[in-house]
Amino acid sequence: MAIFVFADQQHGSFKKAALETLFFASQMAARQQQEVVAVVMGEIDQPQALADLGKYGARRVLHVNAGWLNDFDAQLYARVFKEILTQHEADLCVLPHDFNGRALAPYLAAQWQAGLLTGITSLPDEHGCYQKQVFSGKATAWIRLLPKRQVLTLLPNTFTPTGKEGQAKVEQWQPAQVNAAQRRIRVKEVQTTQGRVPLTEASIIVSGGRGLKGPENWGMIEQLAEVLGAATACSRPVADAGWRPHHEHVGQTGLTVRPNLYIAIGISGAIQHLAGVNGSKYIVVINKDPEAPFFQAADYGIVGDAFEVVPRLIEAIKKYKGIS
Amino acid sequence: MKILVCISKTADTTAKIAFTPDQKSFLETGVQFIINPYDEWYALVRAVELKEQYPDTVLHLITVGGADTEPILRKALAIGGDAAFRVDLQPIGIEQVATAIAAHVKQEGYDLIFTGKETIDYNGSGVGGYLAGLLDWPFVSLATRLTYDGKTVVVEREIEGGREIAEAELPLVVSCQKGIAEQRIPNMRGIMAARSKPLQVMAAPPEAQQPAVQIDHFALPPKKSGVHLVEPGNEEELVRLLHEEAKVI
């Protein structure tokens, strides 16, 4: 029996969340004497990248090398996946809980008639329960899936792959029942923000709130993010006021993030904002109001004026990193 | 065109989350319930805008839940929509909700179905995709923009570090998030009109009766041990702590 993993890629570069999911599956497989099979859709530029998935725990790679699968389409991908799972008589499939995984997993579960559990943050315990954040991070639930066939999605930044040796066995796989003519979603354009760390993949996030007084003051936030190799985020009032784009909004009605380090600057820490960030491993709060509720949720803090503290913090980090 | 918007009842964003002493159930005492913000602010409002653009559009709302969800449905009708449906079932998990809605869709027939990107209580993010999978319709998730010219839907969605613009024909299922529409506050005329709009209660189809998940128990996150404050002016000490103690830089 094997665990199948959706190894999501673009031009042969595998998404961070996909590698984490492979690693997670290999941890699960090790307990049950199973092997991990990575499924890769679409053409890739570097064939070596496929065999290298072995470093993340894949024993085999099934590569569906078709140009018409280069663009993601939940319906088409689910059909191909279902064919693979059926042919291999599989009963477990794990996907990253990222943009594509969140679309594909439920679609696949419906078509493959499997139970679905999304956004898990742990391996199963002795009772077969997975942990999952609920109420947007305000609580954790222990949930088990009843059907034998299961589709899981793993929350990004939960498992950190540790380097392994090994190369996966790469096999080409051709779908028999799915073809290009079945595509109903035509991708017209892909716009990427160049040179910036995607918020969902960032291990460090620098976030600004109303305390920064206006969009013209975001220079120091971006500068701090740059020296840390971090992504930038903001609180809801900031996005609503149009100071920053909506996709940077972190919180209960925005993005839920769980980086290793979340630096909150000029954010008071409303309950809705905390819900979106309290999965972070460490939280640093910089706020001039010592009563700001965010300090209750923080690991480290500086009570002080952001306009003085942040430039000094940038200098301190440059000094530590040896950047002049 | 016929549009269906899936509506869910959730605890208010400011609600303090607590559980029964055995940790098995969510404690509803004193909790205010609202329309799931993604369903209300984005899915419903975008559907209402499309109806304003194409006045012959029929707009239906559906929820899967007990009688306690009816005030939520009425509030949603006050924002817009011609009629609401309630599938009488207390669902646990994505499969039951999607299966119940799929049965209604097959009977009633729709061109476009909107859901919110997820509910803010169980954060499953799966009803839209599961429903599309059951219907075998195309599906676009996490849409931040959507236009319809009477034939083709152009939809923009978020991807890692960017966005993707795609075209699709109807029928289509779309899960919506911030950007696709702006929140609307229902006005008095809408609230009055909602009172007399049809709200039909339907029995759950047999295939939706069995849950696929079982919640064993809940827990609140462990309390932080307390913030370690660093004096302003001593930022180098913070950098040292992040490096040596937290090991995150």
Image (cartoon, helix red, strand yellow):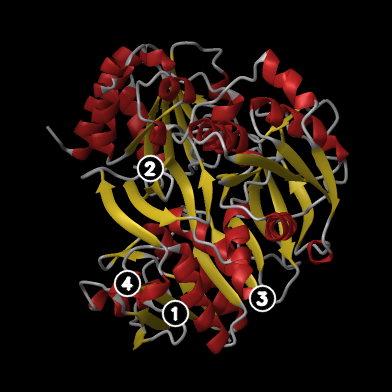
Q: Which residue is mark 1?
A: A178
Q: Position of residue A123 (x, y in %)?
A: 61, 64
Q: Which mark is residue A68?
A: 4
Query: Which residue is at 45% across, 70% downward?
Result: A77
Whether labels 3 and 4 belong to a single chain: the reply is: yes
Whether labels 2 and 4 belong to a single chain: the reply is: yes
Q: Earlier in the sequence, mark 2 or mark 4?
A: 4
Q: Is residue A240 left or right of residue B240?
A: right
CA gap between label 1 and label 2 equals: 34 Å
Q: Which mark is residue A137?
A: none
Q: Is residue A130 left or right of residue A86?
A: right
Mark 3 against mark 2, which lies toward the viewer?
A: 3
State whether residue B61 is above or below residue B29. Answer: below
Q: Chain of mark 3?
A: A
Q: Which residue is mark 3?
A: A149
Q: Earlier in the sequence, mark 3 or mark 1?
A: 3
CA gap between label 3 and label 1 equals: 22 Å
